[in-house]
Amino acid sequence: MNGRNMRGDTAMTNGRRLALALLGGTMLGGMPTIALAQTAGAQPAEEATGEQPAPAPVVAPSPDTIRSIAITGSERLEPQTILSYITLRPGQPYSQAAADQALKELYATELFSNASVRNDGGDVVIEVVENPVINRIILEGNKRLKNDKIIPEIKLAPRQIFTRSKVRADTARIVELYKRQGRFAATVEPKIVELSQNRVDVVYEISEGPKSKVRQINIIGNEVFSDGALRGEMVTKQSRFTSFFSSNTSYDPDRLAFDQQKLRQFYLTEGYADFRVVSAVAELTPDKKDFIITYVVEEGERYKFGEVAVDSQIRDFDSDLMSGQLPMQSGDFYDAKLVEDTVEQLSELAGTFGYAFADVRPQFQRNKDDLTMGITFVLNEAPRVYVERIDVNGNTLTQDKVLRREFRLSEGDAFNSIGVKRSTNRIKSLGFFQENFEIEQKDGSAPDRIVLEANVEENPTGELQLSAGFSSIESFILSASIRQRNFRGRGQTIGAGVNYSRFSRSFNLSFTEPYVFDRNISAGIDLYRRDFNSFNFTGSDRNTTFSQATTGASLRIGVPLSEYMSLVGSYTINYDDVTLDENQFFADLDGDGVRTCEPLIAGRFLCEAIGQRVSSILGVTVAYENLDSRFRPTRGSSVSLTTEVAGLGGSVKYIRNRANAKRYWNVLNGFIFSLSAEGGAINAWGGSEVLLTDRFFLGEPQIRGFDIRGVGPRVLRQPIVDDGNGNPLVVTDPNRISDDAIGGNSYYLGRAELEIPLGTGARELGLRPSIFMDVGALFNVATPQLQQSPFPGGLAFQRRDTAGNPLFVTAAGVATTDSVDDMGNPLSPLNQTFAPFQEVFLGDSASPRVTIGIGVNWNSPFGPFRIDFAHALRKQPGDDTKKFTFNVGTQF
């Protein structure tokens, strides 16, 4: 029994333990925090006993799972497209971090202005607000920078998605564009105009502000040179009222750095080898209108040249001989520019002898004790180079031979730098290709081989011009011309032109072949017809005198005599018909019934000019030219001598000689100075006289400051009136005097001109101002037989009709050939009376006429435009001056 009781107690005890264990498990599963606390509280007891019981299991919470993702708010974009932008997918666990990542991915597309994510028990809803579409980009307030300069520089464009980040970037970009123009006060305010269908107009309101000028340039530390002298070396100029034509008064950071280099170059040229710019600071004034620039400089000591020599490693050059030819001498003040020029000259000299890759390196020996700079120009050894190949690239219309025949070097020739430079200038002078054309030099297949490449960009060579203009000489002008300067890509020139004005009409056809049968012989032909109405002046009134119609043709052939000299022969045949208005200038004063040109009316020089004649002219011209460009030269010279002999056939006999010379210099950093001189003389032979139509005439536009034909011999017809006491009084009022220019047999003309460079804006407009001085004279003509109408009654004669019959006047004032009326009463003769006048011959003087002035060339949309203001410093009696002249629509 006791055993049974013990077993019963044991069973009861085990049952209690099992119930407690089940209850404890239930409590641990439902109250993890408490269990953890109990476990934590029991730890010391465990530590005391040293026992390590198994840890109780921790059960993690069950997370939400994404069952679906819905997109709301989209208008243009499909929901599936939006889902493709994010990594969130159904079946993934949902968390706030995943939602934030989805928002980042949506905003990164820049397609949405707003987005949100919410979770409804595993159903995720993404709500978006799409960015609008840009309808238009509008710029307001921009005058200095046009739309075509701004629009390509900004990011936003019509039909793109609007984003505020791009608007901010575009605003900054527009402000930067204005800063580059020197407008640092410019502001841009973007505005959005909302439209239907989620569209917007983006408006950039621009306030350009004034151009930020350089108010002051301060220089600190200079002792040898004044502030004014140093400012003169800089490109940047101070803003003054006299500098309104220049764009260099605006602030430009790049120009600031360039001016520092200019200062250094200036001091090095003057011998200050230790010069340096310590600092250069540009400060913007508080009103953002101007800049104040301050330079701090250290001049250092002035050096002189020490020992200078050439050390040639090339056996063809003698070092001692070359040292004696150096432009600098020991004891001269040091000049860095002279050193650079010497290096360039030595390199060109080596290139002339075929050493294309000659390396000239100056070695300096600076001695700070005696302030000298010794220099040794080391001409390093280099192989002699030969032209392996000449490549021509980029020509699509122009044939290769047109370029190759301008090369002064051939494949296989020894390299010559002068030949390369000359070839470059000859190709540029063709006018078919880009202005900045240069022949490139590249390594050949061996160290002693070189390849010359002509990489060209063809310019349009066809010209079609229809223009109308107004000239102070010709009044209204109409012209039309067509010309092709590279006909069929062969370098040929063909053209036709028509001109019409109040006093002249012309038509011409021309053709020029520069290389006949691919030989260096040029040939050309011109066919033309010119109708010209000459005129004189009575005061400011222009009166037509004689008319000259010329029909002719000219043939010419040219051959080169040397690289820069050529010989051109020509033959010209002209048929001239010179006429006067018979009703105005013809009369029958002797009563023989024949109306002829009356010298009393027209002047003897006009009566001698009328008639028909044929001129057969043989000419020859010797020309020298080494200009860098024939179209707009900046350096070089040209000289020509021409002799024309008329009389080998025809009815006109004379010898006419002309000389012309021009010289151009590029001076003072962009200024172009030119001198030109010309002169001519014509002499008759074979017992003939030089006709009025073959003489020289001088005036506008050849010599500015004088009217057309305003210089040289002339006949003035002055009226004679009664002084009130019965005595003759010669009228001196220019408005009542008839002025006839009769030309001269000799002339000379000289001109000095300085073209002034302008800023970038003015250059883009094609403005080229200049100051000039003209000197010239026209002379050497026989004194004409002068006419006079006696005082006081003048001279009267009876008028006749075209058949020579005397005319009478009826009581009604009608002219008739009947001497009596119907009643048999005699009619009064129809007389023409010449009021008293006298003729004076003036102006036949070789004394120089001198004018000075300022002019502007403008390549206007209407054609070349030239305006001149000139003042005559020296003139002769009878000369006609004119201060203001202009011409538009025609070439000068």
Image (cartoon, rainbow, N blue to C red):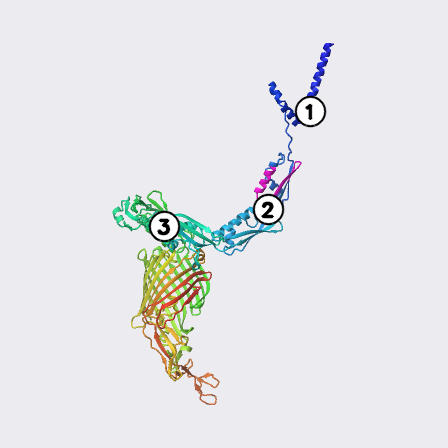
- The answer to whether the residue labelled 2 contacts the one labelled 3, judged by CB atoms less than 8 Å apart, is no
Q: Residue furthest right?
A: 1
* Crowding at mark 3 (Cα within 10 Å: few <14, some 14-19, many 20+): some
Per the image, the residue denoted by label 1 is 26
Of 44 and 673, nearer the camera is 44
* Crowding at mark 1 (Cα within 10 Å: few <14, some 14-19, many 20+): few
- Where is residue 289? Give x, y as percent: 48, 54
- The answer to whether the residue labelled 2 contacts the one labelled 1, judged by CB atoms less than 8 Å apart, is no
Question: Which of disc 1 and disc 3 is earlier in sequence?
Answer: 1
Q: Disc 3 versus disc 1: distance between alpha carbons?
A: 96 Å
> What's the residue type where badge 3 is placed?
Gln
Can you tell which mark lies on residue 265?
3
Quadrant of the image occupied by residue 652: bottom left
Residue drawn at (63%, 29%), measured in percent from left and top? 60
Q: Which residues are magenta?
A: 98-125
Per the image, the residue denoted by label 2 is 131
Q: Disc 2 versus disc 1: distance between alpha carbons?
A: 57 Å
